[in-house]
Amino acid sequence: MPAQVWRIRLIQIAVALVGTAVGIESARLAFTTSWYTFGDTSSWSAVLGLAAGAALVLAGSVELGSPPSRTSGALLAAAGMAWLITAWDNPAAPTWVFVAGRILDTVWPVLLAHALLKRYGSLGRAERAVLLFGYACTIGLDLAVSLVSDPVTSGCADCPANPLLLADLPGIAAGLDRTATLTGPIWAILLAAALATRLFRSTPARRRIELPITTIGVPLLIVVAAGYVRTTVRKLPETDDAALWAAESGLLLLLALATRWPALSLALTRRRMAELVVQASAVPPIGGLGHVLGEVLHDPTARLLYERQGEDHDHLIDADGNPAQPSAQLTPLLRGADTLAYLDHGEPILDHEGAVIAQVARLSLDHERLHAERTAQLRELRASRVRIVTAGDRERRRLERDLHDGGQQRLVSLALGIQLAELSPAPAESSRHMSLLADAATGVATALAELRTIARGLYPRELADEGLQSALETFAESDPTPVELDCDLPDRLPQAVEAAAYFTVDHLLATPSYEPAAGRAIRAWQEGNQLHIELVGSRRTDDLTMAEDRVGALGGTVQRIGAGLIRIVLPCES
Amino acid sequence: MRVVIADDEVLLREGLARLLTEVGLQVVALVGDQPSLARAVALDEPDVAIVDIKMPPTHTDEGLVAAADIRHQHPRVGVLLLSHYLDSRYAVGLLEQHSAGVGYLLKERVSNIHVLVDALQRVADGESVVDPTIVSRLMTRQRRSGRLNELSDREREVLALMAEGMSNARIAESLVLSGKTVERHVGHIFDKLGLAESPDQHRRVLAVLAWLRGR
């Protein structure tokens, strides 16, 4: 256990011990004297009051143990002790106990309100002002009164002499007393209002956890205000005074119990998370973890988003690796400083719930996150492959066009020129001249034929203009040996798909012209969103890597089914 | 013979015009796109129009559209399409669209003035013309597959010329045979291939081409 934790434990124990000491003294005074304690002389009111004080001190010292509520815990314990000290304002008490009782017996509601406000975090200026006002009107005025008033001379013969007395000024003391009584309802109501405002202004998650405590604290402060009003207006029967005290005791007791609510809620969360562990241990399918969490958190809209590791950190992806926009609230699930995932949820959840999810479902989260990342990467890779292939096809088409529009046209013009020269009046050495021209004409014709073949190989015109069916028909026809073609593709397919299909067929089925290859066949048809092609009689004995690369880029497959039978399947969505 | 040339390649159409003038044809208009071609055909009343299949604006098959237009509005004017593509589908498509007076030649054929002038003459006479290279390729394929085995060499020659669109008279002239001999050969060919003989010249070309393209 680290040193800091030890120190906290010691402080907690010390607070509990001091509280116990205060409580023992209060109990002694309550049970051994006949004076009013906790609003009555009866023992049941004393028991209730003592129980409430003890519960508050205990709750405060427990709260001291967790860092965010440390100050509030200390204040709560102090409020509990101050509540117990109300019993010390008892003439039968030892002098200093009596003095402490006189000074401290009204401050507990202010301490309590301070503790409850502090639970919401640091205080605002107005809250601080009201608290200061409250402290001034209670402990401040009481201290002032004990400096200028001797209880013995003001009618309490049994009271011990006041050791703090500076000067006995009954007039001023009475005025101060009256001020304290009159300002009481004011600060009490103001503090109740501040507390209620805090509750309404806090986040839904915070509100859920503070609701029980604050809804007890606010009426308690109102009861305190009523108590002051009761003191001012002395017309009410005595029993009501006891009833007010009993209400305060009861509410304090409830409040002490309510401070355990957040911890209880955490325990509940843990139990729900335990369900999650059980469910998660079955390893939910990818994307299923979000559903499991949705069930556990009773939020069907809940889903998990992951940060895409890499250059762009704003980029979130879902379990399937698709880019995702968070729809509602986004709670990071943290492990240490690392964000494992984000929970995108419609219903508010608490920070500790996020932490517990991160803890409990860590392995599943890691698993799903890695899967999401890998899927996203794969998708990007695939897109880039498609881009590369399409760019290649585009380049082929451009070259094919350039060959026709540039090279071929020039050559035809050249052929025309030669023809003209042949027809023009012949010079002296005409036969030599004519044979040279004839040679040139033959050369140009050969160049044209070759150019046409190259252009066709680059990108057949029918493929661009009329589609795969026409291109395959021409392929089957142009090949030196007949190829049987059974092709049923009435509609045009996306250009990339047509190109991939055609060039794959060309690659797998084309044979050198010197090697006659009979018995080759192409079957092509569309089935739903897929283009199917079967090739019979491919002479290729090497592996299908090249075909697989081209078809695979579009998410298709190439398989060798049996002897000489190859099946190509290509998805057709553009 | 009055000729209109439509080709967006200036160098080529000028050269072609000079060549045709040189061999005694009358080139009445040189145009570079389809609207000008339509105007020229309407104004100059040519016997035949030489049309490049690729013309502005898209450079794909404007020539085909232009051919259809001309044949529709001026049935008397023959159209000879020039193409870079050795593609029987285009040729057959063209022939199927029109009843007669159309031709499909590879563009480079212009460098053989005799073939070109012959083709022009035949188109002007209302016959059909299919580029010999296309026919010869189809013939090669069928010979390899063995479907032409029953034909004699001479019959194969006659078949090829029929596919190119020639009439019996021209075939006779081309092969230096008598008209009767050619007719006999044609009869045998149709018998052996199982084709019904048609008196219509154009239909005959289409039937023969269809047989040659078939498997």
Image (cartoon, coloured by chain):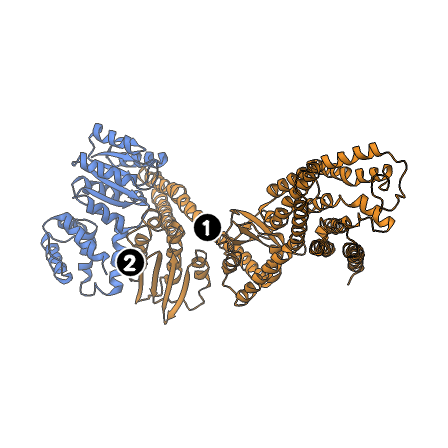
Chain colours: A orange, B blue
For residue A511, say whether it is visible.
no
Q: Quadrant of residue A135?
A: top right
Is the residue marked by circle 2 packed among few (<14), some (14-19), or many (20+) residues within 10 Å? some
The residue closer to the viewer here, A495 or B55, is A495
In this view, which residue lies farthest toward the bottom? A563
Residue shown at the point (39%, 62%) measured from the top left: A508
> Could you tell me residue A498's position as x and y percent?
37, 53
- Count the labels in the image: 2
Check the image and report above or below for A306 versus A434.
Answer: below
Q: Chain of mark 1?
A: A
Q: Which mark is residue B148?
A: none
For residue B119, say whether it is visible.
yes
How far apart are the alpha carbons under marks 1 and 2?
Answer: 26 Å
Question: Mark 2 = which residue?
Answer: A487
> Could you tell me residue A572's position as x and y percent?
37, 54
Which quadrant holds the N terminus of chain A? bottom right
Check the image and report above or below for A375 versus B82.
Answer: below
Q: SS class of the residue under badge 2?
A: strand
Residue type beneath disc 1: Gly
Residue shown at the point (13%, 56%) measured from the top left: B186
Is the residue marked by circle 1 packed among few (<14), some (14-19), or many (20+) residues within 10 Å? few
Q: Chain of mark 2?
A: A
Please indicate whether residue A369 sits to the left or right of residue B124 in the image.
right
Please indicate whether residue A5 sits to the left or right of residue A238 in the image.
right
Residues at marks 1 and 2, common chain?
yes
Check the image and report above or below for B163 versus B32.
Answer: below
Question: Mark 1 = which residue?
Answer: A392
Choose mark 1 or mark 2, whichever is in front. 2
